[in-house]
C-alpha cells in the first residue's frame, strides 16, 4: 500500500516534491508547521514567537502554503493558518512503516542478549 | 518489551527509538561491534543479513547484503562518522549495487546510536534516524517496503 501511495504522490504531482523538500529544509518553517498542526493561528500570532519581522514570517508561511503543508482561511479580518493534515498524515505513515522495521530489529537485539545471558555470557 | 519509547517527528523527519536491555553496556555494544552478532539482528528473518566488511572506526566502512526468499540480494553500506565505544556510534546508511559499491543515486540516512548504563546490568539504547528530506525518506522506506512485501508474499506462498 505504501508503494501505491509513493507512486500517487510522485506521478500525480512531480512539482510538489521540490516544494516540500524546500519547505521542510528550514528549522523555522518546521517549527511554524509544528505549531500549526496543533491549532490555527493568525500570522501575527505566529510571528510573535520568532525574533524576526512579520514580513519574514509571512514569507515562511507562504513557502509552507506552496508546498501544501498549511492552508489559510479567512476569519473576519484575520487570516488563520493551519497545518494540512493530508501531507502530514502521509509523512507519519512513512515513519510508521520505518518504525516497524526498527521494532523488529530491536526485538531480535533483545533476544540475542537474552540468549547469551542464559548461555552464561559467551564473549 | 524492549522498546520503551518511540518519537516520530514528521516535520523534522526524524525517528527516535529508545530501548532498555537487561545487559551490561559492554555486551550491548558487542551486538554492533561483532559482525557475526550484527547479522543476527539487522535483517528480518525473511531477509537475513551477511556482513562483508566491518570497520567501526571513523571513516570506516561496513558493507552487507541481505538474502531474500527469492534469492534476491539487496546490498547496503555504512560509513562510520563517529565512534566512542561503548557509548556512541554514528553512521550514514545507504544502498549499494549488486557488487557492493554504494549506489549514489539512492539517498542515505543518518543513524546515531547512544548507549548508557542506567544501573549495573541495565543498558539504555537510543537510536535516532534522520532523513534529509521527505522525498529521500519516501525512496528509502518504499525500497525497504518492497522487500517486506516480497517476504510476506513468499510466506503466503509457503502456507498455500
Image: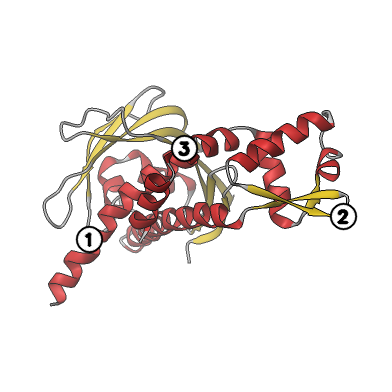
Q: Are marks 2 and 3 in contact (CB under 8 Å)?
A: no
Residue A60: x, y in percent?
70, 34
Viewer-proximal residue among A24 and B6? A24
Discs 2, 3: same chain: yes
- CA separation in Å, label 1 and label 3: 33 Å
Q: What residue did someone put label 3 on?
A: A15
Q: Nearer the viewer, residue B67 or B140?
A: B140
Q: Chain of mark 2?
A: A
| Residue B17 x, y percent position in the rendering | 52, 52
Q: Counting residues from the N terminus, which is met first, the one under dot 2 or under dot 3?
A: 3
Residue B122's spot in the image, x, y percent? Answer: 53, 55
Measured in 3D between alpha carbons, the distance from the residue under mark 2 to the one under mark 3, in whole angstroms, is: 33 Å
**Residue depth check, mark 1 versus mark 2: number of the one nearer the observer:** 2
Q: Residue at x 41, y 23 (%)?
A: B58
The residue indicated by pointer 1 is B151
Q: Secondary structure at mark 2?
A: loop
Asked if residue B111 shows in the view, the reply is no
Q: Are marks 1 and 3 on the same chain?
A: no
Of labels 2 and 3, the one closer to you? 2
Give the residue drawn at x 42%, y 43%: B29
- Frontmost residue, A70 versus B123: A70
Q: Which residue is mark 2?
A: A76
Amino acid at each position: 500500500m505504501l508503494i501505491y501511495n509513493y507512486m500517487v504522490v510522485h506521478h500525480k504531482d512531480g512539482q510538489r516534491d521540490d516544494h516540500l523538500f524546500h519547505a521542510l529544509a528550514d528549522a523555522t518553517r518546521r517549527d511554524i508547521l509544528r505549531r500549526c498542526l496543533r491549532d490555527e493561528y493568525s500570522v501575527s500570532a505566529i510571528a510573535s514567537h520568532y525574533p524576526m519581522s512579520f514580513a519574514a514570517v509571512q514569507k515562511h508561511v507562504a513557502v509552507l502554503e506552496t508546498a501544501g503543508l498549511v492552508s489559510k482561511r479567512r476569519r473576519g479580518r484575520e487570516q488563520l493558518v493551519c497545518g494540512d493534515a493530508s501531507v502530514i498524515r502521509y509523512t507519519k505513515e512513512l515513519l510508521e512503516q520505518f518504525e516497524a522495521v526498527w521494532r523488529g530489529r530491536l526485538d531480535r537485539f533483545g533476544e540475542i542478549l537474552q540468549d547469551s545471558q542464559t548461555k552464561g555470557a559467551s564473549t | 518489551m524492549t522498546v520503551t519509547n518511540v518519537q516520530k517527528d514528521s516535520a523534522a523527519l526524524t525517528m527516535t527509538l529508545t530501548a532498555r536491555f537487561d545487559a551490561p553496556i559492554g555486551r550491548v555494544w558487542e551486538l554492533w561491534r561483532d559482525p557475526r552478532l550484527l547479522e543476527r539482528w539487522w535483517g528480518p528473518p525473511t531477509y537475513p543479513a551477511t556482513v562483508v566488511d566491518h570497520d567501526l572506526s571513523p571513516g570506516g566502512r561496513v558493507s552487507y547484503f541481505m538474502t531474500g526468499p527469492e534469492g534476491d540480494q539487496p546490498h547496503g553500506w555504512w560509513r562510520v562518522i563517529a565512534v566512542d565505544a561503548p557509548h556512541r556510534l554514528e553512521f550514514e546508511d545507504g544502498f549499494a549495487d549488486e557488487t557492493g559499491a554504494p549506489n549514489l543515486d539512492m539517498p542515505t540516512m543518518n543513524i546515531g546510536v547512544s548507549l548508557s548504563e542506567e544501573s549495573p546490568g541495565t543498558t539504555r539504547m537510543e537510536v535516532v534516524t534522520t532523513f534529509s528530506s521527505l522525498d529521500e525518506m519516501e525512496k528509502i522506506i518504499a525500497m525497504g517496503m518492497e522487500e517486506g512485501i516480497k517476504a510476506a508474499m513468499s510466506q503466503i506462498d509457503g502456507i498455500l
